[in-house]
Image (cartoon, rainbow, N blue to C red):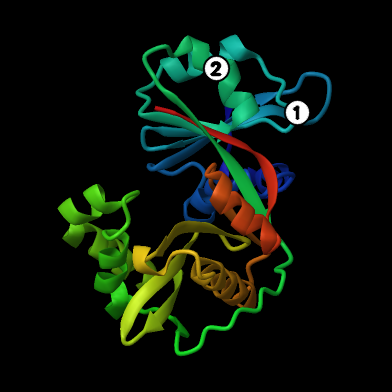
């Protein structure tokens, strides 16, 4: 396993851009750091038969991201490399993580389906008095309060309200995007994107007030959100989701199932 130098950044990016969506976190980290800094290091297993790598490994503090273009690498060498370090989490393409997971029996594997959007389909709905608008850092409180109304999120968001408000405020003050549907001055639906790298945006939250379920408001919030992200230069919008109802909603506006992503922690 060799450690890559900053001078190999272009070659590394070319390798990762074979599958830009699956590598959005990897790319996002190296866009913001030197690849041989105190916080970040990148390692690679060289292919002895061609001028290429079998696998690249990003170390970001005690978290690791793995990517192999062909899903073919020396498993024992990678496992030995990882076990020589402190490991909080290992994530990456599911085909890669599945191969090393048996060597870390104390860690849990979670897999998620990645869906990708490149071309947004029009979804006309009659919204009546409901208004669609971009949300700002000043709206962070009502965003979190909306999540707290949903069973899926309520325990976390109610008990850690101020923490999540700070996170949303910081995200929206940076490159994050949130779109809300407003009715009678109240937020009734929201969709949010985190700016993970220059090319790809990741949808990190969708919520609708239970009183307004089934009216197409989530679809409109997601559509407006993706439209805004494309205007800002994103090439792809991605989301991890395995709820069949949500997946149908997403596929109706143009999302396609792309691949499986896995986290070992």
For label 1, the crowd category at 10 Å Cα-Cα, with few meaning under 14, some 14 to 19 and many 20 or more, is few
* x, y percent for residue 131: 46, 86
Q: Residue at x 49, y 41 (%)?
A: 36
Relative to 64, residue 151 above or below: below
Q: Residue at x 50, y 71 (%)?
A: 217
For label 2, the crowd category at 10 Å Cα-Cα, with few meaning under 14, some 14 to 19 and many 20 or more, is some
Closer-to-camera residue (31/69): 69
Left or right side of 177 for 164: left
Query: Marks 2 and 1: in contact by CB < 8 Å?
Result: no
The disc at residue 100 is 2
The disc at residue 22 is none
Closer-to-camera residue (153/262): 153
Quarter the N terminus occupies: top right
Marks 1 and 2, the one that precedes in the sequence:
1
Closer-to-camera residue (231/36): 231
Relative to 8, residue 210 above or below: below
User: Quarter of the image holding residue 186?
Assistant: bottom left
| Disc 2 secondary structure class | helix
The answer to whether residue 160 of the structure is visible from this angle is no
The answer to whether residue 94 of the structure is visible from this angle is yes
CA separation in Å, label 1 and label 2:
15 Å
Q: Residue at x 72, y 62 (%)?
A: 118
* x, y percent for residue 10: 68, 50
* x, y percent for residue 199: 63, 61
| Disc 1 secondary structure class | loop
Quarter the C terminus occupies: top left
For disc 1, the marked residue is 70
Q: Residue at x 56, y 50 (%)?
A: 245
List the single residue furthest toward the bottom: 129
Relative to 80, residue 166 above or below: below
List the single residue furthest toward the right: 50
């Amino acid at each position: 396993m060799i450690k890559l130098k900053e001078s190999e950044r272009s070659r590394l990016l070319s390798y990762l851009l074979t599958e830009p969506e699956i590598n959005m976190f990897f790319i996002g980290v190296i866009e913001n750091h030197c690849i041989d800094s105190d916080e970040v290091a990148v390692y690679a297993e060289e292919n002895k038969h061609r001028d290429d790598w079998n696998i690249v490994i990003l170390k970001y503090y005690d978290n690791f991201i793995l990517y192999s273009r062909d899903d073919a690498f020396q498993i024992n060498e990678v496992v030995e490399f990882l076990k020589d370090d402190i490991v909080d989490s290992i994530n990456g393409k599911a085909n890669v993580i599945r191969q090393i997971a048996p060597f870390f029996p104390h860690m849990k594997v979670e897999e998620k389906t990645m869906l990708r959007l490149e071309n947004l389909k029009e979804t006309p709905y009659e919204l009546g008095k409901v208004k669609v608008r971009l949300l700002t850092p000043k709206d962070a409180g009502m965003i979190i309060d909306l999540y707290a109304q949903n069973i899926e999120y309520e325990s976390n968001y109610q008990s850690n309200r101020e923490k999540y408000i700070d996170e949303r405020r910081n995200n929206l003050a940076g490159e994050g995007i949130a779109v809300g549907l407003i009715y009678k001055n109240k937020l009734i639906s929201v969709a949010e994107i985190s700016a993970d790298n220059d090319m790809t945006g990741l949808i990190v939250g969708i919520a609708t007030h239970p009183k307004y379920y089934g009216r197409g408001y989530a679809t409109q919030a997601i559509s407006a959100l993706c439209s805004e992200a494309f205007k800002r230069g994103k090439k792809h919008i991605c989301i991890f989701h395995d709820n069949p109802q949500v997946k149908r909603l997403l596929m109706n506006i143009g999302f396609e199932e792309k691949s499986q992503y896995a986290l070992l922690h």
